[in-house]
Amino acid sequence: MEGLRASAGLLRRGRLRRRRQPQSHSGSVLVLPLRPRKVRRQLRRSAASRMAALRAQTLPSEDSEDSRVESTVDGPRDPPPGGATATPDAARREPPSRLVEAPAAPARLVETSALLCSAQHLAAAPPPVAPATLSGSQVDSTGGEPAWNSPLQRVLAELNRIPSSRRRAARLFEWLIAPMPPDHFYRRLWEREAVLVRRQDHTYYQGLFSTADIDAMLRNEEVQFGQHLDAARYINGRRETLNPPGRALPAAAWSLYQAGCSLRLLCPQAFSITVWQFLAVLQEQFGSMAGSNVYLTPPNSQGFAPHYDDIEAFVLQLEGRKLWRVYRPRVPTEELALTSSPNFSQDDLGEPVLQTVLEPGDLLYFPRGFIHQAECQDGVHSLHLTLSTYQRNTWGDFLEAVLPLAVQAAMEENVEFRRGLPRDFMDYMGAQHSDSKDPRRTAFMEKVRVLVARLGHFAPVDAVADQRAKDFIHDSLPPVLTDRERALSVYGLPIRWEAGEPVNVGAQLTTETEVHMLQDGIARLLGEGGHLFLYYTVENSRVYHLEEPKCLEILPQQADAMELLLRSYPEFVRVGDLPCDSVEDQLSLATMLYDKGLLLTKMPLT
């Protein structure tokens, strides 16, 4: 712990530039290593040996059988959809390397960044509740009825039978981009190319979200213009936002829609259980916050100007049709853009790299910095959901946090960084001397290169990685549980009120109870201010950052056991085998985690 406190002192004196100020204990800015280096090496060896023993004793789990989607990439293009005769051939151009043929699903339109959704946007959204169950027959809180046998509902039902949360995330993403293999997508297309997956199945996304869900929300929820719903239109090269003040009642919202405004619903996951399920599973696949917006556009209209966003965008077409034009970044500085662009005029654009009409069931992906615009044609409306992720999740953002701390550590630990600059350096350095051949300038530049190269030795890489993990825990949606996870966790205990008193009270863990974490990635163990804290997601809100970060303090003598539980998922660990100094520490840790909803047991507690 002395090493931990020493590191805490160093990192608290550093400054970390981030777009969101983290909440931390004892005023520390960054999370810290959990142990001195020698102790952590011993811990890794002991944890690895325990993991090997556990796996040797465990039979293959149900999720060991991978689901595979057999598909061909770069297949032939499909014929124009029925009723789209007004769309010229030029509007159907799709580079063969980015077109995937598959059974179709409802198409959706993406117009703007949909990643961040603040508590201000959704102050009137439903309060956080106990985790929902991942199921193919879930009824939305908006009042919409599920499509009982759609491909979406079938895959949700399949996910409910997969015990590992990381396998569920992989399977849902595989379904989302099917028939394209995920490894091909990540290796060849992610952050590089616009991708169109065209399916011949208009029911593919059925049950995810619908215009009927919007209508139910307007009637039953406190939807506010400007916070939850935007009304916008793009006419004669200008975008107009026409949000009246106050609640978005059906009469006002549908009148604006009838007048040609697109309706943009911010963070539908706060109102829709199915969208929440969808994003909560996928966020584990991306390792980054997954957000969404929904766009409803009336026929023969366009809601938003051409622009690019600072997120990776997946457009799911749900209803109707929409003509999309996607353009490559115009200059290198716009590639993988760090911020969203202003609105562009048509004169600012070149030739689109992809131009197509999305049908229900189609999927369109494009990276950060790809300019896009979309419009409804042919007298048909469009409804789409934009799934967005990877906002400010770059190497540059990571190094922006690491380098100032590395410089500070280097100055404290290495005298070379504390030596004074040459007295005459202004005589040969600076823009006015940039063409100088003075040998002193050459020596100065070489000294800078040497010192910069040495910074890697002082970079607190793990500490910054832990800080970003803590931020991700805070950003994340609360988990959605499978039937198995609910039945074997505190959420499934049979305690209830009956005949004037609580019954079935008193179920307890013992040293013989076998446990593992509720899901992978729902908790992170960090050192802050000389203490250990376990940050977790199970009490997060469906509204972005509505709640403060939630954590439990872990005692030093329980740290090894906590790390073993985090690393052993999805294998079970016997409580009596947790590496603690006493049975009391074993039981107190396991009971605290179970009561908080972070552990499940191999058999139901009675």
Image: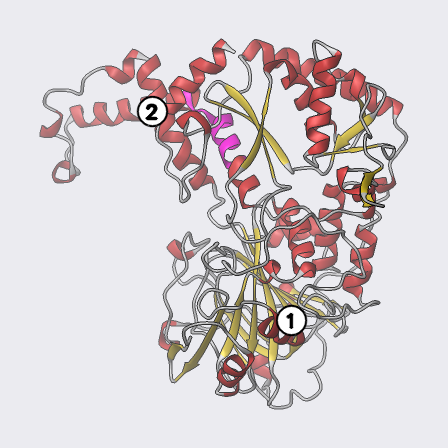
Q: Residue at x 50, y 36 (%)?
A: 468
Q: Position of residue 111 (x, y in %)?
A: 50, 69
- The picture quadrant where one finds residue 80 is bottom right
Q: Residues within 10 Å of mark 1 (few under 14, many from 20)?
A: many
Q: Amino acid at mark 1?
A: Gln
Between the residue at mark 2 and the residue at mark 1, the CA separation in whole angstroms equals 48 Å
Q: Left or right: 19 with respect to 565?
A: left
Q: Position of residue 550 (x, y in %)?
A: 56, 37
Q: Residue at x 52, y 45 (%)?
A: 547
The reply to whether callout 2 and callout 1 are in contact (CB within 8 Å) is no
Which residue is more in the foreground, 582 or 388? 582
Q: Left or right: 269 with respect to 30?
A: right
First in sequence: mark 2 or mark 1?
A: 1
Magenta span: 458-469
Q: Does dot 1 land on a helix, a strand or a loop?
A: strand
Q: Left or right: 335 with respect to 37?
A: left
Which residue is more in the foreground, 368 or 239? 239
In the rendered view, would you say 344 is above or below 410? Answer: below
Q: Quadrant of the C terminus?
A: top right
Q: Residue at x 77, y 73 (%)?
A: 201
In the rendered view, would you say 230 is above or below 281? Answer: below
Residue named by callout 1: 317
Q: Does dot 2 land on a helix, a strand or a loop?
A: helix
Which residue is more in the foreground, 530 or 300? 530
- The picture quadrant where one finds residue 418 is top left
